[in-house]
Every structure is written in C-alpha cells, then in structure tokens.
Amino acid sequence: MTDAQFDDRDRRILALLARDGRQSLREIGGAVGLSAPAVRDRILRLMEGGVITGFTVDINPRALGYTLEAVVRIEPLPGKLARVRQALEETPEVTECLGITGDDCFIARLLLREMSDLDRLLGPLHDMARTSTSLVKTTPIARRLPPIPTR
C-alpha cells in the first residue's frame, strides 16, 4: 500500500493508534467521524496493505532487572556471517540487530543485568567475529514510530 492509497482519515487513525494502541474502535471512530465497524475495516485494510505490521506493548527493562544496555558492532570473520547471525538470533538478550554497510555487518543492542553479562553474551562470538562494545549512558531519543505523512 502506498501513501496515495490511504486518505486523511486513515492517517488520523494511524496517529491515534500510534499515540494509544489500546483505544476502542468507538473512541477512534468518534475522533475521525466513522462508525466502529468502519474503523475496524480501515485498520484491517491497513494491516493487509502492510502499513500496520502489529500491535505491541512497551516493557521497561529495568523493571525486569536489566540495569545496563550495550550497543555492539560486530564484524564476522570470513565465512562466519551466517553463524554469527544465528548466534545473535538465539540470544534473548539481543533486543535488536541491524544489518549494516561498512566494515561491520551488524549492530546489536543487548540488555545486561550486570557488567559480567558481557563476557557471557559475547564470549561465543569471539571465535566467529570481532566486536566493539559501547555502554548506553542515556537515550536522548527513544525508538519511535516513523512520521505519518500529511499528504
């Protein structure tokens, strides 16, 4: 689905869902001038068109005991790309991994309960890749949704 395939009401529905994904269809309908069934149909169409890819919940990692976050640049050794990717996929503490251009192939975000977790999590990679780790001090801009085009 392209930007031209949805209208201003669709954009307003997206903005409302982005602000609070738990709103009722009736609340959204009241805000955009549609019935709840019409809102449901539009949301389903946006999902089928790939604009809405899912609904989620934000969880505070600190509430689960993760006190540190690390960003790791990963450069797989020759012939080890698939093994590194698999190792990252199998590590639950890797909350995000980007495939990138340049010398490194991946940038991964890791959650840590304590500093010693770094050795445990990165140790298995050392025979497959070179890593460069930075600890996150602050998050000036938290992960956010893309801007919704106005037209």
Image (spheres, rainbow, N blue to C red):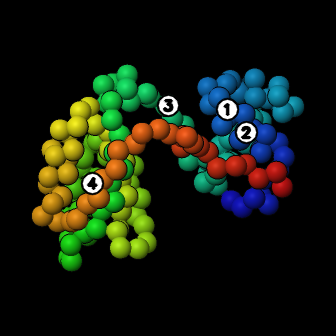
Question: Residue 37 appears in which quarter of the rendering?
Answer: top right
Question: Could you tell me residue 77's position as x and y percent?
Answer: 21, 72
Estimate the spatial distance between the alpha carbons at disc 2 and disc 3, rounded to whole Å: 17 Å
Residue 19, disc = 1
- Label at residue 57: 3
Q: Earlier in the sequence, mark 1 or mark 4?
A: 1
Q: Nearer the viewer, residue 38 or 18?
A: 18
At 37% across and 58% down in the image, what residue appears? 107
Residue 133 visible somewhere in the drawing: yes
Q: Which residue is mark 4?
A: 88
Looking at this view, name the residue that lies furthest to the front. Answer: 137
Residue drawn at x 40%, y 64% is: 99
Question: Which of the marked residues, 2 or 3, is nearer the chain's N terminus?
Answer: 2
Identify residue type, mark 2: Ala
Q: Secondary structure at mark 2?
A: helix
Are the residues at dot 4 and dot 3 in contact (C-beta closer than 8 Å)? no
